[in-house]
Amino acid sequence: MSDERIEFIVAHASGSGVVPYIHPMPFDTLAIVGVGLIGGSVGLAAKTRGVARRIVGIGRDERNLSRALANGAIDQFTTNLAEGVAEADFVVACTPVDRLAEDVIAAAHAAPMRCIITDAGSTKGNILAGIRGKMPVDGPEFIGSHPLAGSEKRGSANSKPEMFDGRLVVVTPTAESDPEAVAVVELFWNQLGARTMRMDAHEHDQALAMTSHLPHAAASALAGVTPPEWLTLTAGGFRDTTRIAGGDAELWAAIFLANRDAVRDALDQYLDRLGTFRAMLTEETHAELVRWLSEGKKVRDALGS
């Protein structure tokens, strides 16, 4: 890709003229903190699409990092975060949401000044609160992002280079964010095959509580109340509805707690609607049940396949 083409994309993404582009792609060094399902997919997609010349994986488990190296997601690895980001042009933090703020701060204090840091966490407000007042004044810029992609499976062994193809990545800059850095983050995800949109962090957390976090809780609740001896009687409906309940319990517990206020709000709305359903069953109101089901069907049909 030529420098002219990169400059055009950054200017278009920023929406305000040509922005000086300090990090021409491919990046010399891309660092990924946390090389699991998403981090591994970032590495594979970046390699496949020529986004970085060298990819450094950073984590706590050498066996996991070795597997990521073997499947081509990274070029080298280290368990020392400061060492891993020391020459990075761009850092993607893909650790659990209860560790992201800590890892972003550590990366910001060890990476080069013009490095840009983003993340892949499904909660944003807790990260901004966690890093407030702890980032270096003249250090790397942090711009939050959340790829709406993934699987109930975990680990770099389940990573795939097409993970982000056509998927949406929500980018959550603040009023203080550098427009150039925001544009570079958007360009990065675009180069991995995703499309991007900007959103306020609080609004993101409210929306994702309803569209992602509550569905996981609902799936887990349904699976949890189903007697094991009835599993032979399940078919596509049960399997489709409970699939995400197979996700990592530690990871999801951290997500629920990190976004607990928004999840409670979403849960209240859900329970209220279920309460209406229960009342209609008690009153045997067929017409109202049809209306209630039709309202849900209308929303689901609008989503498409």
Image: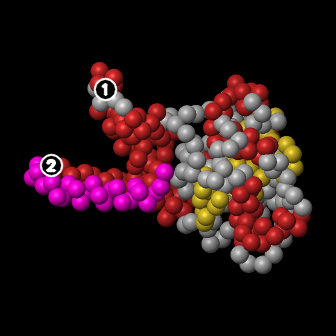
Residue at horizontal 13 percent and vertical 55 percent from the top: 285
User: Which numbered disc, 2 or 1, marks the residue closer to the eye?
Assistant: 1
| Circle count | 2
Kind of residue at disc 2? Leu
Asked if residue 144 can be seen in this view, the reply is no
Magenta stretch: dominant secondary structure: helix
Residue at horizontal 77 percent and vertical 67 percent from the top: 10
Q: CA distance from mark 2 to mark 1?
A: 24 Å
Q: Residues within 10 Å of mark 2 (few under 14, many from 20)?
A: few
Kind of residue at disc 1? Leu
Q: Quadrant of the N terminus?
A: bottom right
Image location (x, y in percent) of residue 242:
40, 37
Residue at horizontal 24 percent and vertical 60 percent from the top: 291
Reply above or below: 76 against 7.
Answer: above
Residue 233 tag number: 1
Residue 281 tag number: 2
Q: In the image, 31: left or right of 287?
A: right
Pick whichever, 11 or 102, lies toward us. 11
Give the magenta-colored segment's residue range: 282-305
Please say whether residue 115 is one of the residues in the magenta stretch: no
Q: In the image, 119: left or right of 6?
A: left
